[in-house]
Structure formats: structure tokens, C-alpha cells
Image (cartoon, helix red, strand yellow):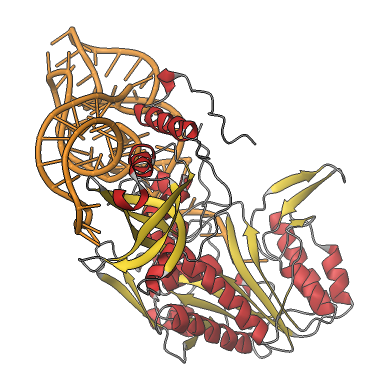
Amino acid sequence: MQPNTPPPAAPEHSESELLAIRREKLDGLVKAGVDAFGGRYDTTHQPGALKANFEENLTVSVAGRILSRREMGKATFFDLGDISGRMQCYLSKSDVGDEAYAQFSGLVDIGDFVGVEGFTFITKRGEKSIHIKKLTPLSKALRPLPDKWHGVTDKEIKYRQRYLDLISNDRSREIFVTRSKMVAAIRNYMQERGFMEVETPMMQDVPGGAAAKPFETFFHALNQPMFLRIAPELYLKRLLVAGFTQIFELNRNFRNEGLSRRHNPEFTMLEAYWAYADFEKMADLVEGMICHLAENFCGGLKIEHKDEEGNVTKTINLARPWKRARYTDLLKSIDPKWYDYSPEERKARAKELGVEIGANFEDYEVTQHVFERLIEAKQFDPLYVNHCPKELVPLAKQNAEDNSIVDVYELVINGQEISPGYSELNNPIVQRERLEHQAGEETQKIDEEFILALEHGMPPAGGIGIGIDRLIMMLTGAESIRDVILFPQLKRKD
RNA sequence: GCGCAGGUAGCUCAGCGGUAGAGCAGUUGGCUUUUAACCAAUUGGUCGAGGGUUCGAUCCCCUCCCUGCGUACCA
């Protein structure tokens, strides 16, 4: 409202010297008649984009944050940067005059936003640069930037003050730019194949579509509890009933569970349904999509993960066709007699294999733990695990020939579940039984409105979910889900 | 929830019973094609919080907070 009024001075005892000095410089700018927190500034290029498509002797107007400076008496070099990258600028006293140069030297800091007008040139050392004719301070930074060389390494600062991480760490910037492009490409991929994007409720009366603890909230106008969705599934299926044949939703789910390197309570999921398709057709769709992303953004189907020093730690080969294998065959590859044992023998064998087994585990859980530890965790190249036992996936269609298994796949890449796919259950009678069975265990309510919709008839359909965060991790080589989520959940700090 | 590691200057880190150090950033001076610019000088710390042991605690012990990793939970 009143940019030319200096803000009131903070009490001295609580303000560090660094901040005090910057406040003084701010006052200096204001006294010189400069709008220290300025307004519109028309630019011709972004700094990083200009450098990437460089031409000499171009008249340009560029704005950005000063990221480093090299002062040499009557001339100064500094780097101007934003999300696009950085570009060197050259400012000399003879170009802008004594007064403007003194103002820059004395009152403009690393961290400040400035706009520059001038022309492009290449320095003696070969650096693409802007020769400044006019410099305009655009916004004063009252706090210093992180270390110019190391950037932010403290994980807590990195996540709580993500902007500092993004200003100072190239790698973080790259990951989030890539993520954004990939998400856009996923939407295009689906739309080009006839899928329509829809939006269904995130606030639900009955949280369904997955077995997870929901976050609860309260809706005052209706005087009733509400839940953040754990999955959009039951609403998307209502749309299949409505006659939509190809739909997807790409948005957030919320699960009230633990945090880990692979889990964030709010995470992004692509869910898609395709009427008259089955889980195999969905697998083809997913395989095509992930390869499309790798080819466009990762330079090919070989994905290399690297450590801090840049050494390759693992290579994921996405070459098609992807391996498809039955759940039971995979377990037989661990122990050919696995399914010949009694449940007690299986428990003993699992422990022998070094897998921790809880005292109260059901037989299928013992098998599932062996699967997770000895197959999934070691599987880096894509593997479609299909025909899983029905206990693991109670909402999918049972196999026509063997009712102990269901028609689903679970896609494993990078040692993680990336995507499940189903031939969807569309029999309302069986669906009710399954939900009641589940509700009995979990003391959950049944979504009667959903059953009502199914009773009106839902076409046979294939469905998928893709954990977008984990997919981005796999494709960018991020080791933690926090490195692909801009603002991951952290405990509040008082 | 449990286990392990960590929290020291604005940032990156060293010190680990004798009262706090470096590099960068900052400040002052010099330098008109530098780029982790350079040269010289210099400011800056309730050593995460609270309690205890000790003549003396950043350092040892206890409790708590925050972070990371692992584990548990997790269709």
C-alpha cells in the first residue's frame, strides 16, 4: 500500500547484525526515492532461457534474483537467476554513472531482485553475459541466501523453507521442473487416448476405495463429520454407471498413516477407468505411458540413479515388453515347494529365509511378507505381478477359472509398488458382501450410495492407480518421496 | 510407537571437560572482462531446550523438542 514508507525498526536485541544492515540499506533505497518493493517490470527473456538460446548483441530486458557477485572496483559481475537458470550480468561505472553505480554497490545485496536492460555479449573468458545499461532494484531481500557453493543441505531447512532449496540447489530445481512437465505429459497422454479428466469429491461422507485410516474433519453447515478421501475410486465408478467410458482423475489422496522415505500422508494418484477393458489392457496403457515419459524426459529407457558424487548406483531398464509373472510362480521361484507346505511350515520357512513374521499373521500375510521382502524389494526393472490372491485385493474381480485369485496386476519398479491395475468388480451383490466383510473387520461404514449406483449397472471395466510421487522418484532418481513433493509434511515446530 | 545418528555464527562444517574455530556470506579498503574472482583487515555464537554431575559442561548423565535413516503400521 505504501511502499515508500520504511517499516518500523524491529527491537535491536532480537535482530541480528546481518538483518540490521539490510534494513539500513532498505532505508537508503527509500531515501534515494527507489521503490524498494517495486511493481511491474516488463522483460524480454528469462535469465536461464536467454542463456540457453543465446545470441550476441541482442537488446534485452531481464529480471531475477542476484545469486552471486564479483565486485572489481569500478565494475561488477553478478549472476541473475530464477527457475529457468542463471545468467551473468556486467555492470560498469562508466555505463550507468557514479551515482547509480554507488547505489548498486552500497544498497543492493545478493538475494535482491533486480531488473536489467542492456545488450548481450560474451566475455573474454567466454561467459555469455548481459552488458547492463540500466539497472532497476525490484525487491529488497532482508535476509541472506544460503551458502553460495553448498546450497542448503540441512534437510529441515530444505523442506520447511523449500524456496531456499530451490534458489540454491540446481538438482532440486530440475526435479520439480521435470515433475511438472511429466504431470502435464501424463494428462496429454491420457487425453490423446480418449480419456476425459474429471474431478470428484475430496471431502467424503464415507471414505472408500481403499483400506486406510482417513483424516477426519467436521462440516459445520451440515453438522456432520467428513473425511478427506483416501481414494477417488467409488466416485469414478459412479461415472462408469453414468455412461462415461474413459475417465481419469489426477489429484491428491490423504491417508492418516506413518511418514517414511516412501510415504507422505497426502500423495498424488492417477486413477483411470476404461469401460469394457480388463487389467491386461490397463497394463499395456501404463507400460506405454511410463515409456513415453522416460523417452521424452529421461533421454531413453535406461534410467540411472546416482549418488551425491554422481556415481551410478542403480540402473532401471524400462525396455519393452515388460515382464509379467504370476504371483504364485514368483513365490515358487523362491522355494519350489512353497505351496506344498502347511501354514506352520511356511511360517518356519519364512523365518529361515530371514523374513520377519508377526505372531498373529494369517497364512496369506506370511506369503505376502516373503513376496515383499524377497521379490518386490529386489525388483528394479518393471515387473507386472498378476493373479494375486484374492485376500490381498478384495475389490477386484475373481478369476473365471480359479476363484482363489483375482484379475489384477501389481506393477513393481525400483523395488516399490508403482501401480495396481484391476478388472473391476461390477457385481453389486458380490460387492456388498465384500464390503460387509471388510467393514466387519475395520468397523467402517459401507458407502450405500455407491452400492445403489452399482445396482443400476456398471459396465465391465479395467481400472488403474498410479502413485505419481513414486513414479517421479523412479524416473528422476530421487531417493526420498520428500525430494519430489514441494512441501512434504513435517511435524510442527513451536 | 521403537532403535540408531544428528542439532555449534546467516549458510557449510571442525572442536567433544579448561570457558568457541575455519570457509563462504556480511562490514571496511584496493582492483573496469570476473566467475567458488582476487588481495588486506574485520564484525558476528544463551554450542536445540530444561535439569543434573563437576572447582569448571558445547563436551559426561537424565528428560524433552526437532530432523534424518531403519523398523513397525500401511489394499
x 40%, y 61%: residue:
A118
Q: Nearer the viewer, residue A305 or A59?
A: A59
Q: Nearer the viewer, residue A477 or A145?
A: A145
Horizontal side, residue A163 vs residue A223: left or right: left
Quadrant of the snapshot with the N terminus of chain A? top right
Q: Which of B8 and A461 is in front in this view?
A: B8
> Can you say whether A386 is above or below B43 in the image?
below
x 30%, y 51%: residue:
A94
Please provide percent x and percent y for residue A157. 41, 44
For residue A312, which quarter of the picture? Answer: bottom left
Horizontal side, residue A431 vs residue A311: left or right: right
Q: Nearer the viewer, residue A435 or A360?
A: A435
Count of picture labels? 0
For residue A395, which quarter of the picture? Answer: bottom right
> Can you say whether B47 is above or below A174 in the image?
above
Horizontal side, residue A346 vs residue A1: left or right: left
Q: Using the rendered image of the protein, determine whether residue A367 is visible from the camera's viewpoint.
A: no
Q: Using the rendered image of the protein, determine whether residue A3 is visible from the camera's viewpoint.
A: yes
Horizontal side, residue A475 vs residue B11: left or right: right
Please provide percent x and percent y for residue A249. 68, 71
Please provide percent x and percent y for residue A374. 39, 72
Please provide percent x and percent y for residue A325. 49, 86
x 35%, y 65%: residue:
A354
x 51%, y 58%: residue:
A485
